[in-house]
Amino acid sequence: MLEKLLWFPLEDFPFVVIVIAIAFTVHEFAHAYSAYKFGDDTAYKLGRVTLNPRVHLDVLGTILLFIAGFGWAKPVPVRASRFKNPRAMSMIVSAAGPLSNLLVATIGMLLLYLLNEKGLLHAGSIGVYSALVHFFYYLIFINLLLFIFNLIPLPPLDGFRIILELFPLKIRYKLEQNMQWGMFIFLLIVFIPPLREVTIVPFMSLIGDTFIALIGLAELVFTPMDWSSILIDFYK
C-alpha cells in the first residue's frame, strides 16, 4: 500500500531519506549563510546557519517530496533591507539555494566516478555495489530536481524571487503584496495537469539534460563508466 504512494521503490526509502535530508539542509543553509555574509543576521539568530537537518526540514514538505516528487523545507527569513545592495544581494541569496544543490549533484557525480576509477565501487559485495549506486543516483537526481524545480519562476520558488528583483519597484511591490496567494496558485499548477504541462513539465525535462552534462564533466576527468549496467541494476 505504502509503495503505491511513493515514486520510488520502497526498498530505496533509506537512501531517499538520507538524500532528502542532505539536499534540503544544504539548500536552506546556503540561503541562510549567504544572507548572513551579506549583513543580515536574522536567520543566524534563529539558528538557521547550520547543517543540522532538524532545523531546516518541514514535515509536510518532506512527506510531499516522498509522495509527489516535490516539496519544501522551512523557508529562511531574509531582511533584504540590511544588505548594502538589496536587489543584487537578494538575487544572490535566492540563487544560492538552487546552486548549492547543483554543487552537491556535481560532487556526487565526481565521487561516483572517483570510486569507480579507484576500483572501490566494485570492491565489495554485490549488495555494497548496489547500495552505493542507489545512493549516488538519488544524491545526484534529487539535488538536480531541487536545482531545476526551484529555478521555476513561480511564487514562492527561488526562481520567482530572483526575477522579482528585475521588475520596476511599483510592479515588484504589487507582486509582493499578493505573495500570500503564491502557494495556492502554485498548488493549482502542480495538481491540474493542463497547467502543469505548460509550466512545470518543460522545466523538469531539463533534469535529464543536466544529468548528462554532469556525466560529460566527470568523464573529462575520470575514466568513462558503463551507465547501462548501472541503470539496469537500478531498475531491475
Image: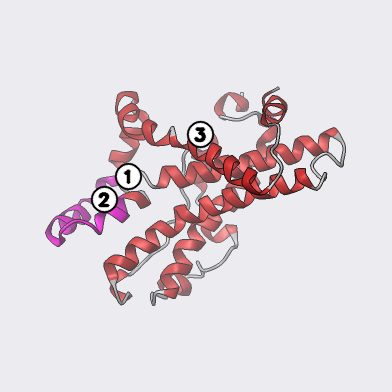
Residue 78 is tagged as none
Residue 170, magenta (yes or no): yes
Q: In the shown orientation, is residue 203 left or right of residue 12?
A: left
Rendering coords of residue 28 (x, y %): 48, 58
Q: Residues within 10 Å of mark 3 (few under 14, many from 20)?
A: few
Question: Distance from label 2 to label 3 (Cα)?
Answer: 32 Å
Q: Amino acid at mark 2?
A: Gln
State the quadrant of the C terminus.
top right
- Residue at (58%, 41%) from the top-left corner? 216
Q: Amino acid at mark 3?
A: Gly
> Mark 3 — residue?
208
Rendering coords of residue 235 (x, y %): 67, 25
Rendering coords of residue 79 (x, y %): 33, 70
| Placement of 204 over or under 17, stated as above or below | above
Q: Are marks 1 and 2 in contact (CB under 8 Å)?
A: yes
Please, which residue is most extreme toward the front here? 220
- Residue at (44%, 36%) from the top-left corner? 206
Q: Identify the magenta region.
A: 160-182
Q: Secondary structure at mark 2?
A: helix
- Residue at (44%, 32%) from the top-left corner? 205
Q: Residues within 10 Å of mark 2 (few under 14, many from 20)?
A: few
| Placement of 209 over or under 161, stated as above or below | above
Tag 3 or tag 1, which sits nearer the N-term?
1
Question: Distance from label 1 to label 3 (Cα)?
Answer: 27 Å
User: How would you classify the magenta stretch by its main secondary structure?
Assistant: helix
Residue 180 is tagged as 2
State the quadrant of the N terminus.
top right
> Mark 1 — residue?
183
Residue 173, magenta (yes or no): yes
Q: In the shown orientation, is residue 25 left or right of residue 193?
A: right
